[in-house]
Amino acid sequence: MPIRTQQSTAAQLNTRVDNTVRTWISHIHVDRGIGRMLVLLVIAFALFAVMNPRVFMNPLNLQNIMVSAPEIGILAIAMTLAMLTGGIDLSLVSIANLTAITISTLYTGVVASDPALAESLGGLIVLVGIAVGVLGGLINAFLISTVGITPILATLATMQIFNGIAIVWTGGKTLYGAPQALSGVGKATVAGIPVLFLLFIVVAIVIGLLVNRTPFGRKTQLQGANPAAARFSGIRSASVLYGTYLTTGLLGGLAGVLFVTRNPTASADYGTSYVLLVIVIAVLGGTNPMGGFATVTGVVLATLVLQVVQSGFNAIRLSSYEYSIAQGVILIGVMVFDQLRFRRRTRYVASTQTRNIASMSNVGDDADESADKVGSP
């Protein structure tokens, strides 16, 4: 009887400790990805609104923030997906540029002979551009999953290849021209909110549901958290990686469409600083660079934080170099804060487990004493 009592108590203790740790981890995820970004967004917005309200709070400036955020945000979401598997995609901006160049080239080629036909084929031209993005993602998936090249090296190589193709294609010049329908979407608003920003929110919701509510999303998270466990669980790593990098290619292509939607031009060197920027946004948004966890909501908020900071720096007439410094300071500050909090919580959980184990030992001793009393004459 005492042995059964101890086993039952131990089982209850294990369950209690497991639930405590799970709750602790879930709080870390929420705080990392969403809570801190909400706080930073409010602080940044309030700070620049006080420093130069005439410029920063101008409705045109606020609209510019919402117009500039989508292309950066979609690239950051794509980077988040790659990081979720424990990888990375350095070729995203190059894929976006190839998409934009494809759209501009096809449109200007047709419009030179028949402007009406070029406009009527606008939708098809956009689809071809997005298909180029998906093809870039497929090449990355093949190199990473089938060939077995490390993601950072594979996507570094394809970034160089795609950049080279773009330079040869354009001759190093800027291309001008895009379907007028895209320009119309770029200028359109709904209740004062740019349509581009609404599209960004829709994409974020779709990817968020994909990651958190579908079997593919759960497999992707497990693949990043523990590839060995994923393999023993029957998850095919190749299919997960192909699906992930095809999706990042698709999102890169969509970002390329937004490039020409916001400004009907295309060039090989557009957004050269975006690669590091989207990595910073993904990490700030709560993405684990080692894989296994990401929050799309946090990435959206991180995108808005950095766009607000950039706009605020312009409002108070600080340079882009000082904005780069601010990016690094924000990233380091958040990472230091995370490390300090993680260590504090680790000590708390360790002390909680020690107390629970001690209480289990006391319960076992009490059970033994009770059994001795029952057995005594």
Image (cartoon, rainbow, N blue to C red):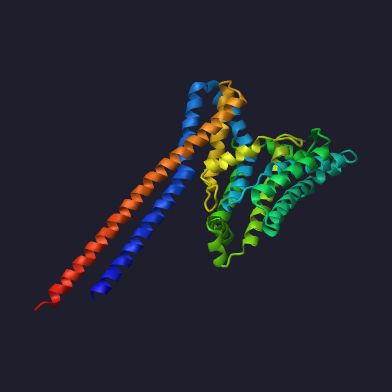
- From the image, which quarter does the N terminus lie in? bottom left
Disc tally is: 0
Give residue 62's quadrant in the image. Answer: top right
Image coordinates for residue 67, horizontal then vertical, percent: 63, 35
Report whether 38 appears left or right of 259.
left
Q: Which residue is painted at 25% across and 71% down in the image?
A: 5
Q: Which residue is painted at 40% across and 45% down in the image?
A: 343
Q: Which residue is painted at 63% across and 44% down in the image?
A: 74
Question: Which residue appears farthest toward the left when viewing the image?
Answer: 377
- Tell me: residue 342, above or below residue 231: above
Image coordinates for residue 189, horizontal then vertical, percent: 64, 37
Report whether 118 appears left or right of 191.
right
Image coordinates for residue 346, horizontal then vertical, percent: 38, 49
Does residue 270 appear in this view?
A: yes
Question: Which residue appears farthest toward the right when viewing the image?
Answer: 113
Give residue 259's quadrant in the image. Answer: top right
- Tell me: residue 229, above or below residue 209: below
- In depth, the one of 34 and 89 nearer the eye is 89
- From the image, which quarter does the C terminus lie in? bottom left
- In depth, the one of 346 and 270 nearer the eye is 346
- Tell me: residue 92, above or below residue 148: above
Report whether 163 appears left or right of 16.
right
- In depth, the one of 42 and 290 nearer the eye is 290
Does residue 202 appear in this view?
A: no
Report whether 284 appears left or right of 82.
left
- In depth, the one of 6 and 252 nearer the eye is 6
Image coordinates for residue 235, horizontal then vertical, percent: 58, 65
